[in-house]
Image (spheres, helix red, strand yellow):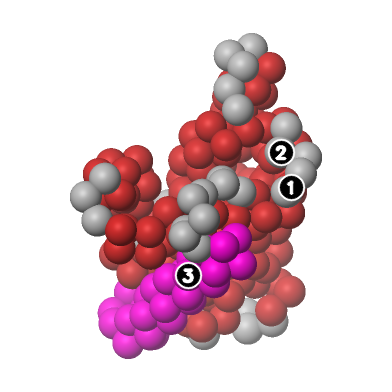
Amino acid sequence: MTNHPWRVLAAELVKLRSLPAVPLTVGTTVTVAAGLAYVAGATPVQVITYAQAGFILLGVLTVAAEHARTSLVAVPGRVLLVAGKLAAYLAVAVPFAAVTCLLAGRASVPVAAAAYLVLVGTLAFAVALLVRRLLVALGGVLTLVFVVSPLLASLTEYAAYLPDLAGARMFRPGPPDALTPVQGAGVLAGWTAGLLGTAVAAFTRRDA
């Protein structure tokens, strides 16, 4: 049992490393990104659009691959536990995003594109913490990004404020009246912070 932040982070990193799905997700995403960019001739925007699925899976796995009750035995502080899991996710996701964006060839805005990938994975992290079901969280976020958002974008201009479509302005050019990259980042960050805050509040109040 520990409440030391560094020990919690170290323990969460060990858990991530021990999950076979995590290195498989990272390796597959990087390989697919390289294949799309250098073999299939995909544009950087297309590569990043498809690569975000790997970050969504990583975010979900960080939370939902282990039952909360097991973690709470070792770390009774629930906020500290979530902070440790989020820090572990970021420790993996940030370099993962940097490599993915370099492979995508997005040399003009590597920081913005990488930030988008990290944020969309954090959004999935928050959803997984809220629903506590791996398949539900994964299916829900993937459906939003690849089905619901494109469909709504063809029906209403307000779809531009959905988290993924707004965040995509960080690396994808839009029409003159679209959100700017900074505005898009703000909308995505707002969605992510709101969902994460809600998820943490729910996690601290309910049974494991």
Q: Which residue is mark 1?
A: 110
Quadrant including the N terminus: bottom right
Tell whether position 68 is magenta.
no
- Residue farthest left in this picture: 155
Q: Residue at x 57, y 37 (%)?
A: 45
Q: Residue at x 39, y 73 (%)?
A: 195
Q: Is residue 201 found left or right of 11 in the rendered image?
A: left
Number of residues whose C-alpha sits closer than 10 Å to that of mark 3, classed few (under 14), some (14–19) or many (20 or more): many
Q: Reply above or below: 95 against 101.
A: below
Residue type at tag 3: Val
Quarter of the image holding residue 123?
Answer: bottom left
Q: Which residue is mark 2?
A: 106
Mark 1, secondary structure of its residue? helix
Residue 23 percent location from the top left of the image: 61, 37
Nearest the viewer among 70 and 114 is 114
Say if mark 1 contacts mark 2, CB within 8 Å.
Answer: yes
Mark 3, secondary structure of its residue? helix
Q: Residue at x 49, y 34 (%)?
A: 50
Classified by dominant secondary structure, the portion drawn in magenta counts as helix
Q: Which stretch is magenta?
A: 180-208
Earlier residue among tags 3 and 2: 2
From where the camera sits, is residue 15 visible?
Answer: no
Q: Is residue 82 found left or right of 34 in the rendered image?
A: left
Q: Which residue is mark 3?
A: 187
